[in-house]
Image (tube, rainbow, N blue to C red):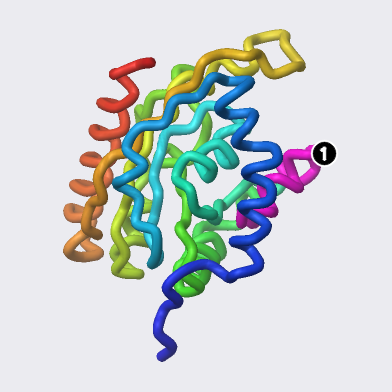
Amino acid sequence: MNQPQEREPFASLVLYHLFKWSIVSPTLHGYFRGRVYGVENVPRRHPLIIVCNHASYFDPPLLSCAVRRPVAYMAKEELFTIPILKQAIALYGAYPVKRGSGDRGAIRAAMGALAAGWAVGLFLEGTRTEDGLIHQPKLGAAMIAAKAGVPLLPVSLWGTEKIFPKGSSFPHSIPLTIRIGEVLPPPISNKREALQAVTERCAEIINGLHALGR
């Protein structure tokens, strides 16, 4: 069996830095007045799973920018029809997942990305929430971490739920704060109890970081 790569492909790393410094970083730190805490907690090499809350279509590129390494995402197929956004998330490693296609394809894709050295980003609730908090965390991230034997990194995105207020078609310049927690080891087994414990711990950390606010 081939050993997992230490990090993502070089070409993806180059594209990531080009897009980050030309567009995403100025947007995060300029337009959104972004603050990022806990960057020292992010492993610079080796595969890992980044778990976070989700409230906006802007979350994937902003998260990738904040952790300072490319992140591969499972993204709804519909997102790849939105101009500009589709180019952004593709450069950052996103891959489309069909609704209703089941979890097996998504799990295989995530496992493949981890084997190639990527950090894989998973939204713990699996969909956007109006308040940016995690209410019903899913076990998928913990299950993939257990199968791949990779750690998890909890991250909180604060403020992104306000980027597009109701009735608005243009992103508002609102302050954003991203807080990165400490790395957690993978579940000790694939049993539901172990997966549940790690999932609940991730949700607790993310919601706790979110509660710190700006």
Q: Position of residue 81 (x, y in %)?
A: 80, 43
* Image height of 127 relative to 189, above or below: above
Q: Residue furthest bottom?
A: 1
* Image height of 10 relative to 182, above or below: below
* Image height of 186 relative to 204, above or below: below
Examine the image and state in which quarter residue 39 appears. Answer: top left
Q: Is residue 78 visible?
A: no
Q: Is residue 91 magenta?
A: yes
How many residues crowd mark 1 within 10 Å: few (<14), some (14–19), many (20+)? few
Magenta residues span 79-96
Nearer the observer, 139 or 74: 74
Q: Is residue 78 magenta?
A: no
Horizontal side, residue 76 vs residue 140: left or right:
right
Examine the image and state in which quarter residue 23 appears. Answer: top right
For the point 68% across and 57% down, which residue is it? 15
Which quadrant, please, contains the N terminus? bottom left
Number of disc labels: 1
Horizontal side, residue 71 vs residue 146: left or right:
right
Horizontal side, residue 177 vs residue 60: left or right:
left
Q: Position of residue 94 (x, y in %)?
A: 62, 53
Q: Position of residue 182 (x, y in %)?
A: 25, 44
What residue does disc 1 label? 83
Which quadrant, please, contains the C terminus? top left
* Disc 1 secondary structure class: loop
Q: Position of residue 64 (x, y in %)?
A: 52, 45
Examine the image and state in which quarter residue 85 appears. Answer: top right
* Image height of 34 relative to 191, above or below: above
Nearer the observer, 6 or 60: 6
Q: Is residue 89 visible?
A: yes
For the point 63% across and 44% down, which residue is it? 20
- Residue kind at label 1, given as amino acid type: Pro
